[in-house]
Image (cartoon, helix red, strand yellow):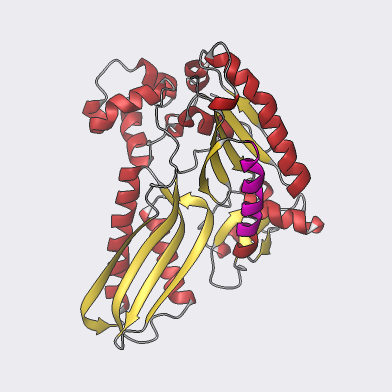
Amino acid sequence: MFRVIFHLDMDAFYASVEQRDNPALRGQPVIVGAPPTQRGVVCAASYEARKFGVRSAMPSATAQRLCPKGIFVRPRMDHYREESRRIMAIVALTGAVVEQMSIDEAYLDLSALCQAEDADASLLRAVPLARELKERIRSARGLTATIGIAANKLVAKIASDYEKPDGLTPISEEGKAQFLRPLPVRVLYGVGKATEQILHKVGVETVGDLQDYPGDLRALVGSFGPKLKQFAFGQDDRPLELGDEIKSISGEETFLKDTDDRKVLRACLLQQAEDIAARLKHRRLGAHTVQVKVRYGNFTTLTRQITVEEPLTDTKDIYRLGCFLLGREKLVSRPLRLLGLGVASLREPNQRQLVLL
């Protein structure tokens, strides 16, 4: 059976919902998050705001400096989750096997619905189905989605990042390697900042450079080398994950003596953030939600969390949001017996904005 995979990505989801619900915000640089006059962070940004460099997890004050005319809107997470539920109900009507990656993203396997005499003919059968799905979402929910179509998850994901917003990009089996050639090597699944820097040092900056690299990649990136070479040619046999994937990553520390010493707590939080970031890197995942957990001397335990639109992978972003939650919620009002940090809503990190070289 020839595989046909959609990657569906809602366009600037949180901000687009706000622009839909309030017509005065349409075409404006909308920043979903706490006001810049308060201690807060950005949860999401519209495409108009992203042009100024505004991104998720950025302090709201920084976002205002970058985008002085940005319109700040407080997030409505329950509303976004309900909107996501309605969109995924529309997706389910396609009859596809669905792996929902996050509140605004999903893989769809339509292989059984699109079989033809060869892989590329099967892909062509899928294009009208993608157009129909996009139109259903637009007419029923007033929102746009971008869809990439390919024979595997890797290429479908990259294709969906290629022409946003409101895009539709099918990539044939015959043309996938050529499609990938001019793109920055960072677009490949599993290539983070550290791996990107290693590859750049040997002159590998594009996927084409990686395709042409004559040496053994294991000398650069260890056991990931052979798989990375396959990814460079658009080869990916990963199946859809239908319920057994990891849900969260966390760590916590119980102190020998209850403490409210900020230096001790910050050092603890930073160590936990470093460990979480390393585990995310190992699994090649990003996180949408950061959560802190505190326990006081009387064993009262509290948890607080924040969700951002774009997945987090870096230690500094996870650490900063952990510190933000402790401060915003005034959780260190008395000495802590335990401090924990965790991430959830895990998915593949977004790729960089694709630019043809």
| Vertical order, 77 against 148 (above or below) | below
Residue sitting at the far top: 117
Nearer to us in this view, 197 or 243: 243
**Res 318 quadrant in image:** bottom left
Q: Is residue 64 above or below residue 196?
A: below
Image location (x, y in percent) of residue 80:
63, 58
- Given residues 45 and 9, the one toward you in this image is 9
Report if residue 92 lies within the magenta region.
yes
Q: Which residue is painted at 33% across and 44% down in the image?
A: 283
Q: Measured from the top left, where is residue 180 in percent x and y?
A: 49, 22
Residue 96 picture location, percent across and down: 57, 35
The residue depicted at 49 percent of the width and 75 percent of the height is 328
Residue 344 drawn in magenta? no
Q: Nearer the viewer, residue 58 or 91?
A: 91
Based on the displayed image, in which of its 4 quarters is residue 230 positioned?
Answer: top left
Image-based side of 135 in relation to 3, left or right: right
Identify whether 131 is placed above or below 255.
above
Residue 22: quadrant of the picture? bottom right
Residue drawn at x 43%, y 25% as measured from the top left: 206
* Residue 310 image position (x, y, % from top left): 52, 50
Which residues, given as a range, are shown in magenta?
A: 80-94
Q: Nearer the viewer, residue 265 or 37?
A: 265
Residue at 53% of width from left, 57% of height from top? 308
As drawn, which residue projects farthest toward the left? 256
